[in-house]
Amino acid sequence: MHMKAINLDGVVMYVSATDDRGVVDAKTRLCFAQKGSRVFARYGGGSVKRGCLVGTLSGSELVFRYTQLEDSGDIHGGRSICEVQRTAQTGLRVIEHFAWSTRSGSGTNIFDEMR
């Protein structure tokens, strides 16, 4: 059975699970755009005023760098390696393994498609 290629273009996601070291939360919304293998997203909500990520999607692996302006006025960022899944219950799901570049720590967040 051939799996349909994953395409994040136009997909809106929310953060369904976050790590203690993460800043995003259930109020954060991510709006994705994709052209070919290139992926871009704007995000915000919760303690993130505005953020963006730029990366590539190859098969089910999404790799990106992110930068965000937080409520504190600080700008932080890092890099993520993610697994993109398609589930019957939630549609597309991104399991993000992030590592901060501007503060200590790393962890895992889960984003689910808003339906």
Image (cartoon, helix red, strand yellow):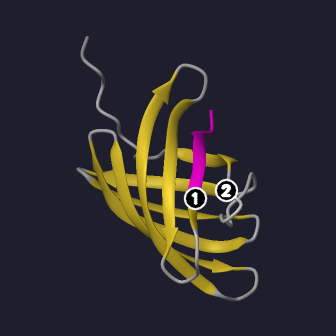
Residue 2 position, x and y percent, is 24, 17
Q: In the rendered image, which residue does mark 1 sit on?
A: 107
Answer whether residue 16 is magenta in the image: no
Residue beneath the point at 35% across and 40% down = 7
Q: Is residue 20 left or right of residue 93?
A: right
Residue 92 position, x and y percent, is 50, 34
Residue beneath the point at 49% across and 67% down = 99
Residue 97 position, x and y percent, is 49, 55
The residue lying furthest to the front in this view is 105
Mark 2 or 1, nearer chain start: 2
Residue beneath the point at 76% across and 64% down = 46
Q: Is residue 102 left or right of residue 57?
A: right
Q: Disc 1 on helix, strand or loop?
A: strand
Magenta stretch: dominant SS?
A: strand
Crowdedness near tag 2: few (<14), some (14–19) or many (≥20) residues, C-alpha within 10 Å:
some
Quadrant where the image shows the N terminus = top left
Tag shown at residue 19: 2
Answer whether residue 114 is magenta in the image: yes
Residue beneath the point at 75% across and 80% down = 71
Crowdedness near tag 1: few (<14), some (14–19) or many (≥20) residues, C-alpha within 10 Å:
some
The residue lying furthest to the bottom in this view is 73
**Which amino acid type is marked by label 2?**
Asp
Q: Nearer the viewer, residue 32 or 85?
A: 85
Q: Determine whether label 2 and label 1 are within 8 Å by CB.
A: yes
Q: Is residue 16 left or right of residue 38?
A: right
* Residue range of the region highlighted in magenta in the rendering: 107-115
